[in-house]
């Protein structure tokens, strides 16, 4: 009876989620430019209805009284309760204060970032940091977790600094030495085989067909999703109708194609979630780290590998024309898609340097939440770490330093580790998969992704949110998160 | 205080309406084919939330206690109450019964119409007719109107058979004589200037550009709307983001262009509604008859006139190419777009014969609701009237007779008169407009629609739902609905 009440509630929440997801995707792809104000008003009202229904006090009684009859129902209840606590542990008064402060701070950030005006932005960020500390404590009180863990738990349930700190410390120490090695190896490779130039323009319509063919090849189900264009690429919508986007430039096609493959990784996860539980938290994707592991699995493990390009290069010619990138072979493509370079900007970073950008933020935001670091001290702390990890200074360039990301201005602390967690999980999944599928590489070279997808469907997608992030990793790969696989992946790809 | 509560409620209802409108348009244009089941579930849940919030018992108290401070607030309350009564006068038990019956009947109709299997369909229709009689009585009890008037009042508030019966009787008597006259005049015209053939194919992309140019020319605001493709053309979305669709065939372009202009008429109305009241019934379009008058104003009064084609013919060449429809002049286009023909199917009918299709249904559905006619007697009654009004028999062809429309299978009785009401109102508006704007025809020939649109904005669009349908007609045109204008329009166009 109580279980049925939760089930009914789930269907109502799913309907509101459905509306919010499709309206969100529509806004970025098909909305008329003047429709934004009313759209924002509608979505804010729908989000309010969602919140009111999802946090109703009687739900606590339903959860307490529910009698699960199967193991899945038991797990579904555990996850429902976790989400209910997460949604109800902040007083309304606090949520309103935080929403107002982060909205103002984000707007200010958009305005001041281009100018790199850190000083004008600082007061707003200080306000956000104060609120995040308050939130961390409220979440800690409600969950029994340490404050920063309580923040991280929203994005990757089960992630703890006690487990992540040694993993990230190990990876950092490895990468500080590996980046120069990889750059030297790249220099040697490029001395023998210089980078080739592209021969654009590549018409958008042809690039679109190539992207669709690549999506189809790696398993995207077009009866449950589509590809459109938006300024910032994303994967949204709902599992039965996944809305993916990309953007095109005509002077090159690789960035759009790689972006499409990245988003397809997210899409396959959504399309593969357990349908019977779609209206319960149990039936949703586990969290940001696992989601990123699915996109990076396709983008990094598959689509930047030599085997993938044995299969994909003919496809490029099929869709872009026989005279596209004349004289290129697989090694030339790999030179481009796996090019390593030290840089200021996280979102532009390659897979070798990217984790150092993340670890820097992970370290700083822990100190910010703990009160060991103040917002005013960020530029100096940032510069010290950038200089140490990547050998580049940002002290006179806040725009390309601590002002580059939206996360902190938006109050999202505890999110950054998910990116590198995703990269490591993807490598660990690949290793586990290769153990049971010895023909993996030759299958991929033939464009056969059935084995890859079946393994991921069984071990990740259909698992939904039954397990915590660390438990899901262990169940899928046979062992806890381990840096060895990611390190081995980087060595194989960049030192060979 | 009470007024503020209604205002707040209005914003929530507007958000749900926004979601339902955009999700509905999205479903027909961009949804993945496999997304339908979850979309239907989500929309049904959102509609349920809308209904629950719109019919809450405390609203009656708020309405009773509200103290309007302006004339607009007073009118807004009157209209709010009308809609509240309309939404609450049917018991939930009845609504569920009717929804189930009409859904089943509509599904059956989709299946059996193609086969023309009236006998198998009849029991479902009998069930719907019984429910509609029940509904008419429930609505009559709640509103104090006669049963059929109470049904009609949902689509065009204020419409009464006492007023419409003589108007339709007059029009019917006129048209029975006018149709043969118009056909004879057409024969004479075509003997002198035979119909010319089209020289397709006309590529879809070029037709789309032509359609967009036509929309822009007659005043569509592309910052608040867009044009897409769907199987059944419609005008949906919300006033700040109107979603229009069309469909294309490549062997001819006039049907898509005329369809686009028809839907643009609807779109201009929506875009022109009073923005400050968008979350109140007062701020919504008045009803189906007035809405149809706006689409038919653009399609029939403007876009099938010789003046329009003086302006539009060069545009056809600009977008479809100089060699499109070679040798055609304005009279050749008019021969096509104003071609008159007796036919079985209402939706394919020209503006001369269309009202006879409507009047036939109006007469029959009044008798059905009153219990003077049973569903089993429809085929014979239909055939008798078709033979009398248009000289064609449908007795052996139910598919092209009483099975052609979705309205009755779907339980929508009282809707049909709106179509012909719209045609008459459009003609009456044109006449009123021409009185105050003597340069109207030459403006249109120059492609200048500013005067036309300003008059409609002032007299129709910005009026929202302040007045009943008959009052709005009188206020806009200076007199009650009068067949003279429509008759004069037909004579001028078809006997000249």
Image (cartoon, coloured by chain):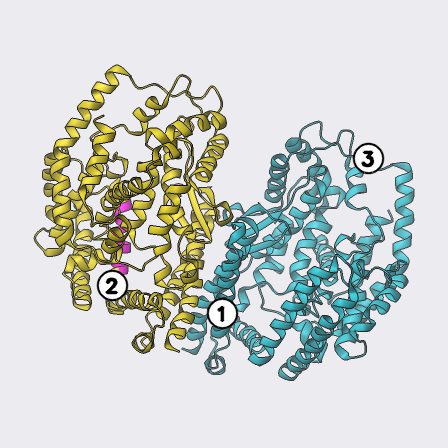
Chain colours: A cyan, B yellow
Q: CA distance from mark 1 to mark 2?
A: 29 Å
Q: Quadrant of the N terminus of chain B?
A: bottom left
State which chain disc 1 sits on: A
- Label of residue A196 in the image: 3
- Both marks 1 and 3 on one chain: yes
Say whether residue B106 is magenta.
yes
Label 3 sits on a secondary structure element that is: loop
In-front residue for pair B68/B179: B68
Q: Is residue A211 visible?
A: yes
Residue shown at 77% from the left, 74% from the top: A366
- Both marks 3 and 2 on one chain: no
Residue B84 left/right relative to B124: right
Q: Position of residue B271 (x, y in %)?
A: 42, 51
Residue shown at 61% from the left, 44% from the top: A215
- Label of residue B97 in the image: 2
- Label of residue A50 in the image: 1
Can you say whether A245 is above or below A322 in the image? below
- Label of residue B91 in the image: none
From this viewpoint, which residue is outermost toward the left? Answer: B372
**Circle 1 or circle 2, nearest the eye:** 1
Residue shown at 30% from the left, 19% from the top: B195
Q: Quadrant of the C terminus of chain B?
A: top left
Q: Position of residue B227 (x, y in %)?
A: 46, 42
Q: Position of residue B95 (x, y in %)?
A: 26, 64
Q: CA distance from mark 1 to mark 3?
A: 53 Å
């Amino acid at each position: 009876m109580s279980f049925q009440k939760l089930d009914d509630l789930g269907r109502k929440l799913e309907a509101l989620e459905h509306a919010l997801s499709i309206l969100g995707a529509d806004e970025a792809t098909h909305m008329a430019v003047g429709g934004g104000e009313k759209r924002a008003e509608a979505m804010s009202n729908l989000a309010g209805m969602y919140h009111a229904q999802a946090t109703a006090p009687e739900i606590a009684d339903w959860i307490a009284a529910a009698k699960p009859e199967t193991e899945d129902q038991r797990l579904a209840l555990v996850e429902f309760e976790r989400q209910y606590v997460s949604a109800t542990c902040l007083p309304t008064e606090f949520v309103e204060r935080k929403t107002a402060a982060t909205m103002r701070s984000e707007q200010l950030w958009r305005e001041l970032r281009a100018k790199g005006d850190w000083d004008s932005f600082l007061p707003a960020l200080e306000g956000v940091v104060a609120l995040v500390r308050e939130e961390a404590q409220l979440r800690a009180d409600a969950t029994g977790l340490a404050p920063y863990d309580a923040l991280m738990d929203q994005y990757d349930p089960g992630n703890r600094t006690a487990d992540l700190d040694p993993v990230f410390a190990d990876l950092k120490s490895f990468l500080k030495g590996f980046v120069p090695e990889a750059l030297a190896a790249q220099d040697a490779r490029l001395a023998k085989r210089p980078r080739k130039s592209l021969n654009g323009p590549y018409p958008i319509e042809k690039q679109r067909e190539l992207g669709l063919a690549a999506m189809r090849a790696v398993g995207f189900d077009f009866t449950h999703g589509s590809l459109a264009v938006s300024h910032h690429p994303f994967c949204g919508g709902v599992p039965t109708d996944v809305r993916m986007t990309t953007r095109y430039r005509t002077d090159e096609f690789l960035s759009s194609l790689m972006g499409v493959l990245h988003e397809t990784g997210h899409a396959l996860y959504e399309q593969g979630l357990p349908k019977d539980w779609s209206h319960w938290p149990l039936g949703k994707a586990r969290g940001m780290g696992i989601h990123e592991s699915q996109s990076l699995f396709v983008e990094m493990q598959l689509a930047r590998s030599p085997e993938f390009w044995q299969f994909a290069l003919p496809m490029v010619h099929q869709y872009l024309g026989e005279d596209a990138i004349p004289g290129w072979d697989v090694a030339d493509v790999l030179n481009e898609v796996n090019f390593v370079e030290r840089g200021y900007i996280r979102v532009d970073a390659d897979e070798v340097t990217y984790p150092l950008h993340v670890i820097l933020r992970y370290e700083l935001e822990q100190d910010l939440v703990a009160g060991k670091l103040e917002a005013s001290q960020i530029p100096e702390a940032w510069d010290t770490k950038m200089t140490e990890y990547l050998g580049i200074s940002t002290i006179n360039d806040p725009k390309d330093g601590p002002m580059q990301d939206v996360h902190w201005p938006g109050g999202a602390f505890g999110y950054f580790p998910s990116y590198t967690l995703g990269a490591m999980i993807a490598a660990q999944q690949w290793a586990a998969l290769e153990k049971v599928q010895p023909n993996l590489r030759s299958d991929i070279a033939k464009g056969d992704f059935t084995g890859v997808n079946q393994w991921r469907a069984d071990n990740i997608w259909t698992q939904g949110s039954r397990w915590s992030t660390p438990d899901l990793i262990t169940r899928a790969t046979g062992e806890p998160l381990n840096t060895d696989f990611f390190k081995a992946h980087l060595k194989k790809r960049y030192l060979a």
